[in-house]
Image (cartoon, rainbow, N blue to C red):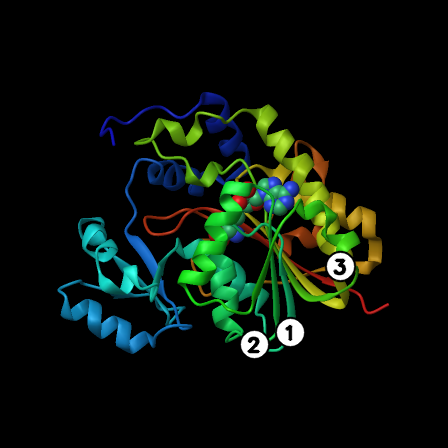
Amino acid sequence: MSETLLELPEEFRQRLAAVLPGDALEGCLATFASQKPTAFRANTLKAGVAEVRAELEGQGLALTPVSWYPEAFLVDQGQRRALTESAAFYDGRIYIQNLSSMLAPLVLDPQPGEAVLDLAAAPGGKTLQLAAMMANDGRLVAVEAVKGRYYRLKANLQQYGATMVEAYLMDGRAAGRRWPQVFDRVLLDAPCSSEARFSQLEPESWAHWSTRKVKESAHKQKGLLQAAVYALRPGGTLVYCTCSFSPEENEVAVHALLRKFGPALEIEPISLPLDNVRPGLTEWEGKALHPDLAHSVRILPTEVMDGFYLCKLKKSNE
Ligand SMILES: C[S@@+](CC[C@H](N)C(=O)[O-])C[C@H]1O[C@@H](n2cnc3c(N)ncnc32)[C@H](O)[C@@H]1O
């Protein structure tokens, strides 16, 4: 990895300045140049949290617990290698995952015995977390459209002991027709422009970025969002999330969904025990968006978390 800091695309910086409040912009820009500690989750399908912690600490790793999630820990970059060489990592008793990513399953809050759909699932970090939260009890369907990534998902499901998962190689936009009104909960961790993963240490991270790509992502997200709603049973819950800052992929996408489904769909508030949370936008490029989008949340990137967008929706009972 090069240690030279490269400039992010100017158009991206300008768009970010329009999205983030002034006080948040500078802090956010600083995170693109920093290396975050490594976050991981104890895989409770295979091991207890205390057991994994004791084992890793016994091997000399300094773990920092995450206050809002007892399963999660951080290690400094300098110990990342030791973590990935540990038996716990090889045996699938821990899963390395950014803290922001861990929020989506927590917000969806699946219960054992329920029917849950993960509509864009590979490599499976959130599917595994959902399976762990459901204790492998119930129905968990994981969909992935890209063949190579689907096989990676299948391998992860096996390695991490997520025996309850039915995995399908298919376009998620067909899920509504395949499983109409079936699921209690749907997670759509949408394919996106991945802007929150940009790193000034890795120019490849934004090599494919352009406003055209953002628009293409938004178009696909629209189809996936509609399929997610069709696959949801009346009264069911949908969590939509992306690792993009672009409103077109976040609030504007949900605004269009609300317009399509009208009163059949409502945004629910999300409450998180974090300081780096801001309400979703209710206006973009001079156009007013649905006021309830203020109940969706933007996770601002920090020295430990990636930026993220999360929106929780409920389908009405009728
Ligand atoms: C943000 S990633 C998902 C990450 C995953 N949820 C996790 O936590 O490990 C989005 C995924 O959607 C997949 N994808 C792209 N287009 C899709 C489509 N039309 N239907 C289903 N999945 C799709 C991508 O290949 C990618 O694996």
Could you tell me if the residues under marks 1 and 3 are in contact, i.e. CB atoms within 8 Å? no
Q: Is residue 15 above or below residue 125?
A: above
The residue sitting at 44% across, 25% down in the picture is 207
Residue 175 x, y percent position in the rendering:
72, 52
Specify the farthest residue to the right: 318
Question: Mark 1 highlights which residue?
Answer: 114
Q: Where is residue 265, by image quadrant?
A: bottom right
For the residue carrying disc 1, how many other residues have a C-alpha within 10 Å: few (<14), some (14-19), or many (20+)? some
Say the numbered circle drawn on residue 166. none
Res 84 visible = yes
Residue under pointer 3: 179
Label annotation for residue 137: 2
The residue under the point 82% across, 52% down is 261
Q: Dot 1: what SS?
A: loop
How busy is the neighbourhood of tag 2: few (under 14 within 10 Å), some, or many (20 plus)?
A: some
Task: Name the front one of labels 1 and 3.
Answer: 3
Q: Secondary structure at mark 2?
A: loop
Q: Position of residue 135 (x, y in %)?
A: 50, 76
| Of callouts 2 and 1, the N-terminal one | 1
SS at mark 3 in the image: loop
User: What is the spatial separation of the Cα atoms under label 1 and label 3, in whole angstroms?
Assistant: 15 Å
Label 2 near ligand 1 (CB < 8 Å): no
Q: Amino acid at mark 1?
A: Glu
Q: Residue at x 83, y 58 (%)?
A: 263
- Marks 2 and 1: CB-CB under 8 Å? no
Q: Amino acid at mark 2?
A: Asp
On the question of residue 271 being in view, the answer is: no
Q: CA distance from mark 2 to mark 1?
A: 8 Å
Say which residue appears at 21% left-offset and 67% top-offset.
56
Count of number-bearing discs? 3
Say above or below: 180 vs 309.
below
Asked if the residue at label 3 sits under 8 Å from ligand 1, the reply is no
